[in-house]
């Protein structure tokens, strides 16, 4: 419960990018087209953690890319 209260002031730089918070997990969603780069958003989270004396556990970090049906993934035919 304390983490949820402490995390209340963590916000994304851009209104296009989203932060989902649940229990002790935070998910950052950054679409392909946005006004703030994912690296800038992540650095914002790291700065927030440092300012609030919290640690981001790098072993728990994951990056996931979702590709919709409108994208064609090139492949090599041999």
Image (cartoon, rainbow, N blue to C red):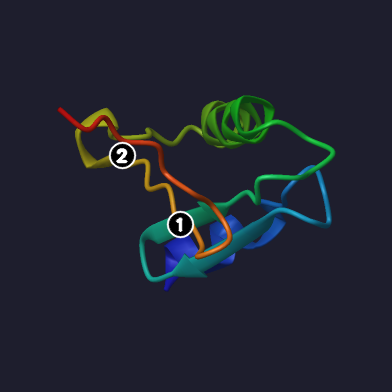
45 or 74, which lies in front? 74
Quarter of the image with the C terminus is top left
Q: Residues within 10 Å of mark 2 (few under 14, many from 20)?
A: few
In the rendered image, which quarter is residue 66 located in? bottom left
Q: Label 1: which residue? A: 26
Element carrying mark 2: loop
Residue 76 pos. (x, y %)? 26, 29
* Residue at the (51%, 62%) spot, across then down: 68
* Residue at the (43%, 36%) spot, across then down: 54
Classify 78 as above or below 66: above
In the rendered image, which quarter is residue 32 located in? top right
Residue 18 pos. (x, y %)? 66, 59
Element carrying mark 1: strand
Query: In the image as oriented, which residue stretches furthest toward the front?
Result: 78
Tell me the tag on residue 71: none
2 or 55, which lies in front? 55
State left or right for residue 58 relative to residue 14.
left
Residue 37 pos. (x, y %)? 70, 31
* Residue at the (40%, 37%) spot, across then down: 74
Q: Residues within 10 Å of mark 1 (few under 14, many from 20)?
A: few
Q: Label 2: which residue? A: 61
72 or 42, which lies in front? 72
Classify 73 as above or below 59: below
State left or right for residue 41 relative to residue 71.
right
* Residue at the (37%, 41%) spot, across then down: 63
State left or right for residue 37 relative to residue 60.
right
Q: CA distance from mark 2 to mark 1?
A: 10 Å
49 or 65, which lies in front? 65
């Amino acid at each position: 419960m304390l983490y949820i209260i402490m995390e209340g002031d963590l916000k994304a730089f851009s209104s296009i990018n989203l932060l989902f918070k649940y229990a002790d997990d935070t998910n950052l969603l950054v679409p392909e087209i946005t006004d703030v780069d994912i690296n800038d958003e992540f650095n914002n989270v790291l700065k927030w953690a440092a300012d609030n004396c919290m640690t981001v556990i790098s072993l728990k970090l994951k990056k996931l890319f979702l590709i919709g049906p409108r994208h064609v993934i090139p492949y090599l035919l041999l």
